Image (cartoon, grey):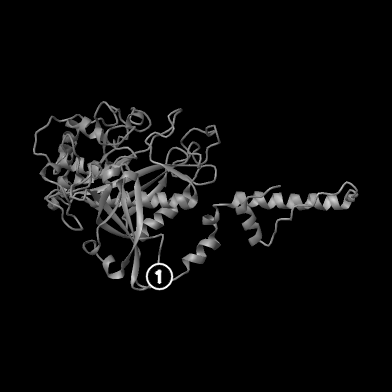
Amino acid sequence: MKLSLALLAAASALGVTSPSPPTPPSSSAAAPPPCRRRRRRRRCRRRLHMSTHLRIQTGKSQLDTAVVSRFNSLPYPPDKILAEYVWVDAKGDCRSKSRTLPSARGKSVDALPRWNFDGSSTGQAPGDDSEVILRPCRIFRDPFRPRDDGNDNILVMCDTYTPAGVPLPTNTRAFGGGGGGGGGGGGGDGSMRAFGDDYHRAGGAFEGREDEEVWFGLEQEFTLFNLDQRTPLGWPTGGVPGRAQGPYYCSAGPENSYGRAITDAMYRACLYAGIDISGTNGEVMPGQQEYQVGPCVGIDAGDQLQMSRYILQRVCEEFQVYCSLHPKPIVEGDWNGAGMHTNVSTKTMREPGGIDAIRKAIYKLGARHQEHIAVYGEGNELRLTGKFETASIDKFSFGVANRGASVRIGRDTEAEGCGYFEDRRPSSNADPYLVTGKIMATIMEDVEVPEIVALDRQEA
Protein backbone atom coordinates (compact mmCIF):
# COMPACT_ATOMS: atom_id res chain seq x y z
CA MET A 1 0.00 0.00 0.00
CA LYS A 2 1.27 3.48 -0.87
CA LEU A 3 1.06 6.01 2.01
CA SER A 4 0.88 9.78 1.50
CA LEU A 5 3.81 11.94 2.59
CA ALA A 6 1.75 13.35 5.46
CA LEU A 7 0.78 9.90 6.62
CA LEU A 8 4.38 8.72 6.37
CA ALA A 9 5.47 11.64 8.53
CA ALA A 10 2.83 10.80 11.11
CA ALA A 11 3.79 7.15 11.02
CA SER A 12 7.44 8.07 11.51
CA ALA A 13 6.52 10.15 14.57
CA LEU A 14 4.83 7.08 16.01
CA GLY A 15 7.97 5.04 15.49
CA VAL A 16 6.68 3.23 12.41
CA THR A 17 8.76 3.41 9.26
CA SER A 18 7.79 2.66 5.74
CA PRO A 19 9.50 -0.39 4.32
CA SER A 20 12.06 0.03 1.57
CA PRO A 21 10.79 -1.00 -1.85
CA PRO A 22 11.46 -4.70 -2.32
CA THR A 23 14.19 -5.77 -4.73
CA PRO A 24 12.67 -7.64 -7.65
CA PRO A 25 13.69 -11.24 -7.44
CA SER A 26 15.87 -12.69 -10.13
CA SER A 27 14.48 -15.34 -12.32
CA SER A 28 16.65 -17.88 -10.57
CA ALA A 29 15.65 -16.83 -7.04
CA ALA A 30 13.40 -19.17 -5.16
CA ALA A 31 9.96 -17.99 -4.00
CA PRO A 32 9.85 -16.96 -0.30
CA PRO A 33 8.61 -19.65 2.03
CA PRO A 34 4.94 -19.51 3.17
CA CYS A 35 5.83 -18.24 6.68
CA ARG A 36 7.59 -15.17 5.22
CA ARG A 37 4.59 -14.40 3.00
CA ARG A 38 2.29 -14.57 6.03
CA ARG A 39 4.52 -12.16 8.01
CA ARG A 40 4.51 -9.76 5.05
CA ARG A 41 0.71 -9.83 4.85
CA ARG A 42 0.43 -9.15 8.62
CA ARG A 43 2.75 -6.12 8.29
CA CYS A 44 0.60 -4.77 5.46
CA ARG A 45 -2.57 -5.21 7.54
CA ARG A 46 -0.96 -3.34 10.49
CA ARG A 47 -0.01 -0.45 8.23
CA LEU A 48 -3.50 -0.35 6.76
CA HIS A 49 -5.01 -0.28 10.27
CA MET A 50 -2.66 2.56 11.30
CA SER A 51 -3.56 4.52 8.15
CA THR A 52 -7.29 4.13 8.79
CA HIS A 53 -6.90 5.05 12.48
CA LEU A 54 -5.01 8.27 11.67
CA ARG A 55 -7.56 9.24 9.04
CA ILE A 56 -10.49 8.70 11.40
CA GLN A 57 -8.89 10.60 14.28
CA THR A 58 -7.76 13.63 12.27
CA GLY A 59 -9.50 16.78 13.54
CA LYS A 60 -10.86 15.18 16.70
CA SER A 61 -8.12 16.38 19.03
CA GLN A 62 -10.30 19.39 19.95
CA LEU A 63 -12.61 16.93 21.69
CA ASP A 64 -9.79 15.29 23.63
CA THR A 65 -9.95 16.82 27.12
CA ALA A 66 -6.35 15.84 27.84
CA VAL A 67 -5.11 17.79 24.84
CA VAL A 68 -7.30 20.80 25.57
CA SER A 69 -6.40 20.84 29.27
CA ARG A 70 -2.69 20.83 28.48
CA PHE A 71 -2.99 24.28 26.93
CA ASN A 72 -5.77 25.63 29.15
CA SER A 73 -3.49 25.09 32.15
CA LEU A 74 -1.00 27.65 30.85
CA PRO A 75 -1.25 30.86 32.94
CA TYR A 76 -2.29 34.19 31.44
CA PRO A 77 0.03 37.20 31.85
CA PRO A 78 -1.36 39.16 34.84
CA ASP A 79 -1.25 42.49 32.97
CA LYS A 80 -3.21 41.27 29.92
CA ILE A 81 -6.69 39.98 29.14
CA LEU A 82 -8.32 38.39 26.12
CA ALA A 83 -11.32 40.25 24.71
CA GLU A 84 -13.69 38.39 22.37
CA TYR A 85 -15.53 41.00 20.27
CA VAL A 86 -18.97 39.67 19.25
CA TRP A 87 -21.28 41.17 16.62
CA VAL A 88 -24.35 40.25 14.56
CA ASP A 89 -23.81 39.52 10.87
CA ALA A 90 -26.08 40.07 7.86
CA LYS A 91 -28.04 36.88 8.57
CA GLY A 92 -28.55 37.58 12.26
CA ASP A 93 -25.92 35.09 13.41
CA CYS A 94 -23.16 36.00 15.85
CA ARG A 95 -19.55 36.32 14.70
CA SER A 96 -16.53 36.99 16.90
CA LYS A 97 -12.78 37.47 17.02
CA SER A 98 -10.24 37.88 19.81
CA ARG A 99 -7.67 40.48 20.76
CA THR A 100 -5.21 41.03 23.60
CA LEU A 101 -5.69 44.13 25.75
CA PRO A 102 -4.11 45.61 28.88
CA SER A 103 -6.06 44.40 31.91
CA ALA A 104 -7.11 47.93 32.85
CA ARG A 105 -8.99 48.40 29.59
CA GLY A 106 -11.42 45.60 30.36
CA LYS A 107 -13.00 47.37 33.33
CA SER A 108 -15.48 49.53 31.37
CA VAL A 109 -16.98 49.82 27.91
CA ASP A 110 -15.68 53.36 27.53
CA ALA A 111 -12.08 52.13 27.96
CA LEU A 112 -12.36 49.51 25.22
CA PRO A 113 -10.99 50.40 21.78
CA ARG A 114 -13.04 50.17 18.65
CA TRP A 115 -11.98 47.51 16.18
CA ASN A 116 -12.81 46.50 12.62
CA PHE A 117 -13.44 43.43 10.50
CA ASP A 118 -13.82 42.39 6.87
CA GLY A 119 -17.47 43.06 6.17
CA SER A 120 -17.26 41.49 2.71
CA SER A 121 -16.93 38.10 4.42
CA THR A 122 -20.04 38.56 6.56
CA GLY A 123 -22.38 40.08 3.94
CA GLN A 124 -22.10 43.54 5.50
CA ALA A 125 -19.82 45.44 3.08
CA PRO A 126 -18.59 45.27 -0.53
CA GLY A 127 -15.17 43.86 -1.28
CA ASP A 128 -13.77 47.16 -2.54
CA ASP A 129 -14.72 48.98 0.70
CA SER A 130 -14.92 46.17 3.20
CA GLU A 131 -13.91 47.72 6.53
CA VAL A 132 -16.64 47.69 9.19
CA ILE A 133 -16.15 49.31 12.59
CA LEU A 134 -16.99 47.45 15.80
CA ARG A 135 -18.15 49.68 18.65
CA PRO A 136 -18.18 48.02 22.10
CA CYS A 137 -21.57 48.24 23.84
CA ARG A 138 -21.62 45.75 26.72
CA ILE A 139 -19.07 43.64 28.63
CA PHE A 140 -19.59 40.09 29.91
CA ARG A 141 -17.19 37.69 31.61
CA ASP A 142 -15.84 35.02 29.25
CA PRO A 143 -16.98 31.57 30.47
CA PHE A 144 -14.79 29.81 27.90
CA ARG A 145 -11.53 31.34 29.15
CA PRO A 146 -11.89 31.50 32.95
CA ARG A 147 -9.00 32.56 35.14
CA ASP A 148 -8.38 32.78 38.87
CA ASP A 149 -5.79 35.57 39.14
CA GLY A 150 -8.21 38.39 39.88
CA ASN A 151 -8.64 39.37 36.22
CA ASP A 152 -11.39 38.35 33.81
CA ASN A 153 -11.16 37.64 30.13
CA ILE A 154 -14.21 39.22 28.54
CA LEU A 155 -16.89 38.91 25.87
CA VAL A 156 -17.75 42.25 24.28
CA MET A 157 -21.11 42.81 22.57
CA CYS A 158 -20.61 45.26 19.72
CA ASP A 159 -22.69 47.01 17.09
CA THR A 160 -21.48 47.87 13.61
CA TYR A 161 -20.75 51.10 11.67
CA THR A 162 -19.17 52.37 8.51
CA PRO A 163 -15.81 54.16 8.95
CA ALA A 164 -17.78 57.42 8.72
CA GLY A 165 -19.79 56.48 11.82
CA VAL A 166 -23.09 55.56 10.10
CA PRO A 167 -24.83 52.46 11.48
CA LEU A 168 -24.93 49.58 9.02
CA PRO A 169 -28.38 48.53 7.77
CA THR A 170 -27.87 45.35 9.81
CA ASN A 171 -27.24 47.37 12.99
CA THR A 172 -30.65 47.23 14.63
CA ARG A 173 -29.35 48.39 18.01
CA ALA A 174 -28.03 51.87 17.21
CA PHE A 175 -29.03 55.01 19.05
CA GLY A 176 -29.35 58.35 17.26
CA GLY A 177 -27.33 61.45 17.97
CA GLY A 178 -23.81 61.06 16.61
CA GLY A 179 -20.91 58.65 16.69
CA GLY A 180 -20.45 58.51 20.47
CA GLY A 181 -18.05 56.35 22.40
CA GLY A 182 -18.81 53.19 24.30
CA GLY A 183 -21.93 52.41 26.28
CA GLY A 184 -25.32 53.64 25.14
CA GLY A 185 -24.19 56.14 22.49
CA GLY A 186 -24.20 55.39 18.81
CA GLY A 187 -24.05 56.79 15.34
CA GLY A 188 -26.35 58.01 12.63
CA ASP A 189 -28.77 60.87 12.20
CA GLY A 190 -32.27 61.69 13.38
CA SER A 191 -33.88 59.39 10.83
CA MET A 192 -32.58 56.44 12.85
CA ARG A 193 -34.47 57.43 15.98
CA ALA A 194 -37.76 55.76 15.17
CA PHE A 195 -39.03 52.68 13.37
CA GLY A 196 -39.49 53.90 9.82
CA ASP A 197 -40.05 52.26 6.46
CA ASP A 198 -36.36 51.95 5.60
CA TYR A 199 -34.54 51.51 8.92
CA HIS A 200 -35.33 49.85 12.19
CA ARG A 201 -33.24 50.91 15.19
CA ALA A 202 -34.13 49.92 18.72
CA GLY A 203 -32.06 52.65 20.35
CA GLY A 204 -34.35 55.44 19.24
CA ALA A 205 -37.36 53.75 20.83
CA PHE A 206 -35.68 53.67 24.25
CA GLU A 207 -33.82 56.96 24.14
CA GLY A 208 -35.29 59.54 26.52
CA ARG A 209 -37.70 57.06 28.12
CA GLU A 210 -35.51 55.76 30.90
CA ASP A 211 -38.06 56.84 33.54
CA GLU A 212 -40.45 54.15 32.32
CA GLU A 213 -38.01 51.42 33.46
CA VAL A 214 -39.44 49.00 30.92
CA TRP A 215 -38.66 45.39 31.76
CA PHE A 216 -38.34 42.64 29.18
CA GLY A 217 -38.22 38.91 29.79
CA LEU A 218 -37.32 36.91 26.66
CA GLU A 219 -38.08 33.18 26.33
CA GLN A 220 -35.65 31.72 23.81
CA GLU A 221 -36.67 28.38 22.34
CA PHE A 222 -34.26 26.37 20.20
CA THR A 223 -33.98 22.92 18.63
CA LEU A 224 -30.95 20.65 18.88
CA PHE A 225 -29.98 18.47 15.92
CA ASN A 226 -27.33 15.93 15.15
CA LEU A 227 -24.59 17.25 12.89
CA ASP A 228 -26.52 16.09 9.81
CA GLN A 229 -28.73 19.14 10.58
CA ARG A 230 -31.79 17.02 9.76
CA THR A 231 -32.26 14.71 12.75
CA PRO A 232 -33.30 16.35 16.05
CA LEU A 233 -31.82 14.85 19.20
CA GLY A 234 -33.87 11.85 20.26
CA TRP A 235 -35.33 11.27 16.80
CA PRO A 236 -34.57 8.17 14.72
CA THR A 237 -32.56 8.90 11.58
CA GLY A 238 -34.96 9.46 8.71
CA GLY A 239 -37.99 8.90 10.93
CA VAL A 240 -40.13 10.37 13.69
CA PRO A 241 -40.51 9.52 17.39
CA GLY A 242 -42.83 6.68 18.21
CA ARG A 243 -44.83 8.88 20.60
CA ALA A 244 -46.61 12.13 19.88
CA GLN A 245 -45.56 15.28 21.72
CA GLY A 246 -46.76 15.55 25.28
CA PRO A 247 -44.40 13.53 27.49
CA TYR A 248 -41.32 15.58 26.56
CA TYR A 249 -42.26 18.97 28.07
CA CYS A 250 -40.38 19.63 31.34
CA SER A 251 -39.65 15.91 31.42
CA ALA A 252 -37.09 13.56 32.92
CA GLY A 253 -35.75 10.21 31.79
CA PRO A 254 -33.73 9.04 28.78
CA GLU A 255 -36.87 8.30 26.79
CA ASN A 256 -38.17 11.87 27.19
CA SER A 257 -35.39 14.40 27.69
CA TYR A 258 -32.80 15.05 25.01
CA GLY A 259 -30.11 17.71 25.38
CA ARG A 260 -30.35 18.48 29.09
CA ALA A 261 -26.55 18.48 29.51
CA ILE A 262 -26.22 21.07 26.75
CA THR A 263 -28.86 23.35 28.24
CA ASP A 264 -27.36 23.00 31.72
CA ALA A 265 -23.90 23.84 30.40
CA MET A 266 -25.27 26.90 28.62
CA TYR A 267 -27.17 27.90 31.79
CA ARG A 268 -24.03 27.82 33.91
CA ALA A 269 -21.95 29.61 31.27
CA CYS A 270 -24.53 32.41 31.06
CA LEU A 271 -24.59 32.81 34.84
CA TYR A 272 -20.79 33.01 34.88
CA ALA A 273 -20.87 35.60 32.09
CA GLY A 274 -23.23 37.82 34.08
CA ILE A 275 -26.30 37.29 31.91
CA ASP A 276 -29.61 37.55 33.78
CA ILE A 277 -30.71 34.07 32.75
CA SER A 278 -33.70 33.17 34.91
CA GLY A 279 -34.45 29.57 34.02
CA THR A 280 -34.53 26.68 31.54
CA ASN A 281 -36.90 23.87 30.63
CA GLY A 282 -37.41 21.09 28.13
CA GLU A 283 -39.97 22.01 25.49
CA VAL A 284 -42.98 20.29 23.92
CA MET A 285 -41.25 18.85 20.85
CA PRO A 286 -38.53 16.27 21.60
CA GLY A 287 -35.10 17.79 21.06
CA GLN A 288 -36.42 21.29 21.72
CA GLN A 289 -35.30 23.34 24.72
CA GLU A 290 -35.93 26.80 26.18
CA TYR A 291 -34.21 29.31 28.44
CA GLN A 292 -35.36 32.68 29.73
CA VAL A 293 -33.38 35.92 29.97
CA GLY A 294 -34.61 38.75 32.17
CA PRO A 295 -36.09 40.81 33.45
CA CYS A 296 -33.71 43.26 31.73
CA VAL A 297 -34.20 46.99 31.38
CA GLY A 298 -34.53 48.57 27.95
CA ILE A 299 -31.84 47.98 25.33
CA ASP A 300 -29.97 45.66 27.70
CA ALA A 301 -32.49 42.93 26.94
CA GLY A 302 -31.25 42.78 23.35
CA ASP A 303 -27.61 42.83 24.42
CA GLN A 304 -28.08 39.99 26.88
CA LEU A 305 -30.19 37.84 24.57
CA GLN A 306 -27.76 38.19 21.68
CA MET A 307 -24.81 37.28 23.89
CA SER A 308 -26.72 34.31 25.30
CA ARG A 309 -27.24 33.07 21.75
CA TYR A 310 -23.52 33.35 21.12
CA ILE A 311 -22.79 31.36 24.30
CA LEU A 312 -25.38 28.75 23.27
CA GLN A 313 -23.67 28.28 19.91
CA ARG A 314 -20.25 28.01 21.55
CA VAL A 315 -21.56 25.36 23.96
CA CYS A 316 -23.09 23.41 21.07
CA GLU A 317 -19.74 23.63 19.30
CA GLU A 318 -18.15 21.92 22.31
CA PHE A 319 -20.80 19.19 22.31
CA GLN A 320 -20.67 18.86 18.51
CA VAL A 321 -24.42 19.41 18.22
CA TYR A 322 -26.19 21.66 15.71
CA CYS A 323 -28.52 24.31 17.16
CA SER A 324 -31.36 25.74 15.08
CA LEU A 325 -33.38 28.86 15.84
CA HIS A 326 -35.79 28.20 12.96
CA PRO A 327 -39.39 28.85 14.10
CA LYS A 328 -40.70 25.66 12.48
CA PRO A 329 -37.81 23.23 12.06
CA ILE A 330 -40.15 20.25 11.49
CA VAL A 331 -43.02 21.19 9.19
CA GLU A 332 -44.44 17.70 8.63
CA GLY A 333 -46.52 16.20 11.40
CA ASP A 334 -48.01 17.58 14.58
CA TRP A 335 -45.03 19.26 16.22
CA ASN A 336 -44.73 22.60 17.97
CA GLY A 337 -42.65 25.39 16.49
CA ALA A 338 -40.17 27.56 18.37
CA GLY A 339 -40.72 31.12 19.55
CA MET A 340 -39.20 33.95 21.54
CA HIS A 341 -42.15 34.93 23.72
CA THR A 342 -41.55 38.44 25.01
CA ASN A 343 -42.79 39.53 28.43
CA VAL A 344 -43.20 43.28 28.92
CA SER A 345 -43.78 45.50 31.94
CA THR A 346 -43.42 49.25 32.34
CA LYS A 347 -43.23 51.03 35.66
CA THR A 348 -46.85 52.13 35.26
CA MET A 349 -47.95 48.55 34.60
CA ARG A 350 -46.32 47.36 37.82
CA GLU A 351 -48.06 49.94 40.00
CA PRO A 352 -51.56 49.41 41.52
CA GLY A 353 -54.17 49.65 38.81
CA GLY A 354 -51.57 48.89 36.14
CA ILE A 355 -53.91 46.43 34.43
CA ASP A 356 -55.49 49.40 32.64
CA ALA A 357 -52.12 50.40 31.21
CA ILE A 358 -51.55 46.79 30.17
CA ARG A 359 -54.85 46.62 28.29
CA LYS A 360 -54.22 49.96 26.56
CA ALA A 361 -50.79 48.75 25.47
CA ILE A 362 -52.32 45.57 24.08
CA TYR A 363 -54.88 47.55 22.08
CA LYS A 364 -52.03 49.57 20.54
CA LEU A 365 -50.20 46.35 19.65
CA GLY A 366 -53.34 45.09 17.96
CA ALA A 367 -53.68 48.27 15.89
CA ARG A 368 -50.15 47.73 14.51
CA HIS A 369 -50.31 43.94 14.28
CA GLN A 370 -48.89 43.59 10.74
CA GLU A 371 -46.07 46.05 11.46
CA HIS A 372 -44.99 43.87 14.34
CA ILE A 373 -45.29 40.66 12.35
CA ALA A 374 -42.95 42.20 9.76
CA VAL A 375 -40.11 42.40 12.32
CA TYR A 376 -40.94 39.33 14.41
CA GLY A 377 -38.76 36.86 12.52
CA GLU A 378 -38.39 35.00 9.23
CA GLY A 379 -40.46 31.90 8.57
CA ASN A 380 -42.94 32.87 11.27
CA GLU A 381 -45.86 32.15 8.94
CA LEU A 382 -45.00 28.45 9.27
CA ARG A 383 -45.39 28.70 13.04
CA LEU A 384 -48.29 31.13 13.60
CA THR A 385 -51.04 28.93 12.20
CA GLY A 386 -53.57 29.05 15.03
CA LYS A 387 -52.46 25.56 16.10
CA PHE A 388 -49.83 24.23 18.51
CA GLU A 389 -50.21 27.02 21.08
CA THR A 390 -50.13 29.87 18.56
CA ALA A 391 -52.55 32.45 17.20
CA SER A 392 -53.11 33.00 13.49
CA ILE A 393 -50.58 35.29 11.87
CA ASP A 394 -53.44 37.09 10.11
CA LYS A 395 -55.53 38.02 13.15
CA PHE A 396 -54.59 39.71 16.42
CA SER A 397 -56.08 38.47 19.69
CA PHE A 398 -55.43 38.55 23.40
CA GLY A 399 -56.74 36.73 26.42
CA VAL A 400 -56.15 35.81 30.04
CA ALA A 401 -54.09 32.60 30.38
CA ASN A 402 -54.77 31.89 26.70
CA ARG A 403 -51.71 30.47 24.95
CA GLY A 404 -53.64 30.36 21.70
CA ALA A 405 -53.81 34.18 21.62
CA SER A 406 -51.33 36.68 20.15
CA VAL A 407 -50.85 38.29 23.57
CA ARG A 408 -51.45 36.65 26.93
CA ILE A 409 -52.23 38.20 30.32
CA GLY A 410 -51.29 35.91 33.20
CA ARG A 411 -53.76 34.85 35.88
CA ASP A 412 -51.66 36.48 38.59
CA THR A 413 -51.58 39.79 36.72
CA GLU A 414 -55.36 39.74 36.32
CA ALA A 415 -55.88 38.85 39.99
CA GLU A 416 -53.45 41.47 41.32
CA GLY A 417 -54.50 44.18 38.90
CA CYS A 418 -50.92 44.90 37.80
CA GLY A 419 -47.87 43.17 36.38
CA TYR A 420 -46.94 42.34 32.79
CA PHE A 421 -48.16 40.88 29.50
CA GLU A 422 -46.64 38.30 27.15
CA ASP A 423 -46.38 38.87 23.39
CA ARG A 424 -46.35 35.33 21.99
CA ARG A 425 -45.86 36.30 18.34
CA PRO A 426 -42.04 36.71 18.01
CA SER A 427 -40.29 33.73 16.46
CA SER A 428 -37.24 32.00 17.88
CA ASN A 429 -34.99 33.60 15.25
CA ALA A 430 -36.37 37.11 15.77
CA ASP A 431 -33.97 40.00 16.33
CA PRO A 432 -34.33 40.90 20.03
CA TYR A 433 -33.41 44.54 19.34
CA LEU A 434 -36.17 44.84 16.74
CA VAL A 435 -38.73 43.05 18.90
CA THR A 436 -38.13 45.03 22.09
CA GLY A 437 -37.68 48.31 20.24
CA LYS A 438 -40.85 47.88 18.20
CA ILE A 439 -42.89 46.98 21.27
CA MET A 440 -41.50 50.01 23.12
CA ALA A 441 -42.22 52.35 20.20
CA THR A 442 -45.81 51.09 19.87
CA ILE A 443 -46.89 51.06 23.51
CA MET A 444 -45.41 54.53 24.14
CA GLU A 445 -47.39 56.15 21.34
CA ASP A 446 -49.86 58.80 22.46
CA VAL A 447 -52.77 57.59 20.32
CA GLU A 448 -56.33 56.45 20.81
CA VAL A 449 -57.09 52.99 19.39
CA PRO A 450 -60.21 50.80 19.50
CA GLU A 451 -60.63 48.36 22.34
CA ILE A 452 -60.33 44.66 21.57
CA VAL A 453 -62.54 41.99 23.09
CA ALA A 454 -60.52 39.50 25.11
CA LEU A 455 -60.41 35.92 23.85
CA ASP A 456 -60.69 34.31 27.26
CA ARG A 457 -61.32 30.66 28.00
CA GLN A 458 -65.02 30.66 27.26
CA GLU A 459 -64.36 31.99 23.75
CA ALA A 460 -61.11 30.10 23.11
**10 Å crowding of disc 1: few (<14), some (14-19), many (20+):** some
Task: Classify 344 as above or below 362.
Answer: below
Q: Can residue 124 be seen in this view?
A: no
Question: In the displayed structure, does residue 203 sit left or right of residue 73?
Answer: left
* Quadrant holding the C terminus: top left
Numbered label tally: 1
State the image quarter where residue 182 is shown.
bottom left
**249 shown above or below 294:** above
Q: Could you tell me which residue is drawn at 35 percent across and 31 percent down? A: 383
Q: Looking at this rendering, what residue extends furthest in the front direction?
A: 27
**Amino acid bearing label 1:** Tyr
Residue at the image point whose x is 34% and y is 32% from the top: 379
In this orientation, does residue 243 appear?
yes
State the residue in front, 372 or 407: 372
- Residue identified by numbered label 1: 76
Residue 274: image x %, image y %? 32, 59
